[in-house]
């Protein structure tokens, strides 16, 4: 009878100890999980921050090193014979085009450059301008040439068409410059690109370039 009265007391003490132990274990587990989550969040934050910094650096580098196309402008173009009575047999086409490398840290390698003159989309002359050359960053090259004789194929019928346009106040031509180029960044060189620059030019009755065409930028594309 006496031993039976003491049994519940002993059981209650063990139960309280078990609950205290269970509670301590529970909170310790929660603390560990909380610390693990915090460490994971810190690691993720550091990783994302580093990733963002690297992305910004790569983007800025790409912007600064992204190749820009060369810029061509027609500075002068003339056909003096249009204002003379000598006609097409003594005709000459004189042109002056500037080639600008707008890049800050990028050079351009040019293979031989070819110039072709078009009238109404028909080629009427052409010649090679330069041997292969290298153009440094922020540099300008003057492309000067004369088409005449064998390099200018103008017959009497074509000259008559010039005269008809001249009576209207303007004779329009297209000067096309083509070359194969490569971009150079320090020691790295890009693949070869076939470049075309199309320059519309118009001359007045005196054979001189009209003001609206002077220093006009020529569209440039690659193929």
Image (spheres, helix red, strand yellow):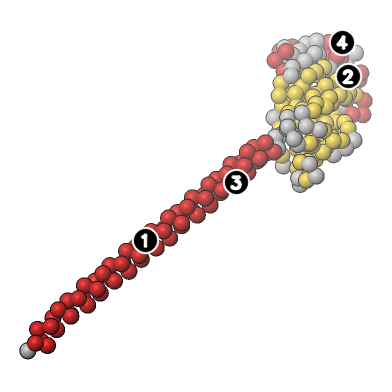
Mark 2 burial class by Cα count in 10 Å: few <14, some 14-19, many 20+: many
Mark nearest the camera among 1 and 4 is: 1
Q: Is residue 1 above or below residue 195?
A: below
Q: Is residue 47 visible?
A: yes
Label 1 sits on a secondary structure element that is helix
Q: Residue at x 70, y 34 (%)?
A: 68
Q: Earlier in the sequence, mark 1 or mark 4?
A: 1
Residue displayed at 63% across by 44% down: 58
Residues packed near mark 4 inside 10 Å, few (<14), some (14 to 19) or many (20 plus): few
Against 22, residue 56 (above or below) is above
The one nearer the camera, 20 or 54, is: 20
Q: From the viewer's side, name the closer residue of 213 and 206.
A: 213
Quadrant for the N terminus, please. Answer: bottom left
Identify residue for label 1. 31
> Mark 3 near mark 2, Cβ–Cβ under 8 Å?
no
Q: Residue 116 placed where, x, y %?
A: 81, 31
- Distance (Cα) linking label 4 and label 3: 66 Å
Q: Which residue is mark 3?
A: 54
Q: CA distance from mark 1 to mark 4?
A: 99 Å
At a point 91% along the width and 20% down the height, the residue shown is: 89
Q: Which residue is mark 4?
A: 84
The mark nearer the N terminus, 4 or 3, is 3
User: Decide: marks 4, 2 in contact (CB < 8 A)?
Assistant: no
Label 4 vs 2, first from the N-terminus: 4
- Local crowd at mark 1 within 10 Å, few (<14), some, or many (≥20)? few
Name the spot of residue 85 as percent of width and height, x first: 88, 10
């Amino acid at each position: 009878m006496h031993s039976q009265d003491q049994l519940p007391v002993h059981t209650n003490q063990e139960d309280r100890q078990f609950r205290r132990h269970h509670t301590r274990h529970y909170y310790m587990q929660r603390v560990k999980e909380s610390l693990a989550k915090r460490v994971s969040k810190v690691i993720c934050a550091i990783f994302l921050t580093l990733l963002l910094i690297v992305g910004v650096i790569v983007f800025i580098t790409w912007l600064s090193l992204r190749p820009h196309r060369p810029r061509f402008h027609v500075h002068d173009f003339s056909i003096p014979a249009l204002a003379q009575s000598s006609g097409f047999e003594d005709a000459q086409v004189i042109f002056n085009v500037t080639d600008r490398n707008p890049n800050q840290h990028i050079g351009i390698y040019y293979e031989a450059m070819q110039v072709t003159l078009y009238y109404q989309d028909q080629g009427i002359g052409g010649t090679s301008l330069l041997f292969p050359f290298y153009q440094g960053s922020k540099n300008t090259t003057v492309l000067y040439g004369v088409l005449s004789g064998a390099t200018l194929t103008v017959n009497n019928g074509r000259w008559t068409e010039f005269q008809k346009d001249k009576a209207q106040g303007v004779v329009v031509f297209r000067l096309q410059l083509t070359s194969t180029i490569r971009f150079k960044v320090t020691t790295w060189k890009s693949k070869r690109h076939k470049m075309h620059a199309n320059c519309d030019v118009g001359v007045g009755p005196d054979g001189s370039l009209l003001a609206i065409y002077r220093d006009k930028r020529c569209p440039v594309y690659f193929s």
